[in-house]
Image: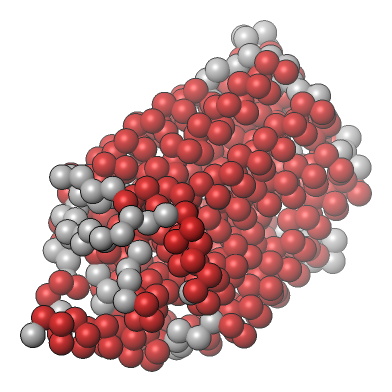
Amino acid sequence: MEQNRIDARTKWSYCVGATGRDMAYTLVNLYLITYIQYTMKLTVAQFGVISTCIVLCLIWDAVNDPLMGIIIENCRFKAGKFKPWIFTGVLLNAVMIVLLFSVRPQGWAFVVFFGISYLLWGMTYTMNDIAYWGMLPSLSSDPQVRNSLVTLMSIFICVGQFSVAGILPTIVAGNAVRAYRYASLVVASCFIAFQMLTCFGVRERPAAQSAEKLSLRRMFGIFRRNDQLISIGIGAFLFNIGNGLLIVFAVNFFYFEFGYAAGGSRVFVFTVMYGLGTLISQACYGVFSRLFTRKKLMRACVCALTVCYAVLMMFGYVIPKNIIILNTVGFIIFFFQGLWNLMVIVMLNNTIEYDEYRFSERHDSVIAAIRSFAVKLSGAVNQGISAAVLIVSGIYASSQKISQLEIEAGKGAVSGSAVLQQADVYINAVLPRQTLVLRAGMVLFPLLAFCGCYLLIRKTYKIDEQEYVRIVGEIERREGRSST
C-alpha cells in the first residue's frame, strides 16, 4: 500500500540520526561508571551508593518509559507526534551529559550531585528515546520496509557505538580527567547535530487522534491483553542483560589482564571486532531473514554464543592467552549478538500490528516503550552485577590506587607516562583469584540470560513470519472495507 512506502529523505534522516543517539548512550552507559572508578577518589561505601543510585535511577527510568509513551500518545503538535519530544529531549540531555563528566565535587558531595544529575539525565534521555523509537513502527507496516529500516538504522547505531566505545579507551589512560571532559563535549554536540537531522529531515505521517485519552490504567490494560508483547518484552530484557555485560566488563578485563598501558589499545582492537561483527551482522540480516526463519536463526545464535563464551572463560587458563584467539572469539560473539538484537527489535515491533489486529487499536509509542523499558531495566541489572563483581573481587579497591594517579595527573602533578608505569605496578599486584571472579561474572551471567531468552521466546512467542503477513493482510482488508 502507498501509505507503507517512505521516501529516501525520511529513510536516511531517520536512520542516520541514530548515530548521535548511540554515541551519547554509549558514553554514559559504558564509561560513566569507568570514569568514576578511575578518576574519582571514593570509598567503597561511596562507590556502592553511586552504583545503587544508578540501579534505582535505571529502574525508575524503565518505569518512566511507558509513562512517557502515554504522554506522547495523548499529545499532538503542529510539528508532529514525535518530533517535539525528540528535539526537546536531545537539547536537555546534551547538557546533562556535559555536567556528569565535568562537575567534580569530592566525597559525599559528589555522590549527591551524581544522584540528582544521573536521574535528570535518564528522564531527559527518555523524552528523546521513546519518541525516536515510537516513530519507527509508525513509518511503515510493510515487513520488508520495516526490516530495511531496522537494518540500516542498526548500522548507524553500530557506527555511533563504535566511535565512542572503540576510540575513548585509547585516549584516556594517563589523562583521564581531561579526556572524559572533552569527550563529553564532542559527544553531546554530535547528539544534537544528528538528532536535528531526524527532526528536520523526516516526513512524519499524520497520526489519527484517538477519541479517548490514554490513561495509566488503560496503558497497563494494553500491556496485559497483549500476550505476545509480554513474551517478547521479557525476552528483550533477558537478551539485553546478556548483550551488555561483556562490554560493561571489557575495560576492567583488559586493564587487569594486559596492563593499564596496553589495555587501552587492546580494548580498541576488541571494539573493532565489536564494530565489524555487529556491522556485518546488520548488513547480512536482510539476506538471512529471507533464507532462514527467525526460529532457526535464534537457535544458531544461542549455540554459537554458548561455545564462544565457554572459550572466553577458558582463555588464558586452558586456551593460550593469544590476542588473535581473543579477538576472533569477540568477533563471533558480536556477530551473533547483532543478529539476535535485530530479531528482538523486529519481533517487538510486530506486536503493534498484533494488538491492532486483535483490538482494532494502534499504540505505537506505548508498545515501543517496552523496548526502552527492557534496555534500561537490563542496564540496571548489569550495573548491579558489575558493581558487585568489582567490589567482591577486590578489583575496585585496586583501581582506586590508579584513580589517585589520574587525579594527580589532572592537576599536572605527575606526567601521563608516570601514571601508566605506576598503574601497571598496582595491576601486577592483583591476585589471580580476583581476575578469575571478574572473568566468571563476565561469562556466566550472559550465558544464563541468553539461554533464558531463547527458551522463553521459543515456547511463548507465536508471531512468526507467516503469521505476521496474515495479520497485516487482515488489517489492510478491514481498512479497505471501512473505506468503501
Answer yes or no: is residue 326 visible: yes
- Is 349 in front, or is 283? 349
Marker count (numbered): 0
Q: Quadrant of residue 426?
A: top right
Q: Residue at x 26, y 54 (%)?
A: 14
Between 357 and 382, the one nearer to me in the picture: 357
Residue at 34% across, 32% down: 91
Q: Give the left or right position of residue 116, taking residue 288 as reference.
A: right
> Is residue 82 rendered to the left or right of residue 39?
left
- Confirm whether residue 22 shows in the render: no
Measuring from the top left, give residue 35's x and y in whole percent. Answer: 62, 30
* Left or right: residue 131 compared with residue 402: left
Residue 370 spot, x, y in % from top left: 49, 60
Q: Is residue 460 above or below residue 427?
A: below
For residue 406, what is the image quadrant?
Answer: top right
Could you tell me which quadrant the N terminus lies in?
bottom left
Q: Nearer the viewer, residue 306 or 465?
A: 465
Could you tell me which quadrant the C terminus lies in? bottom left
Residue 267: x and y in percent read 61, 46
44 sits to left or right of 1: right
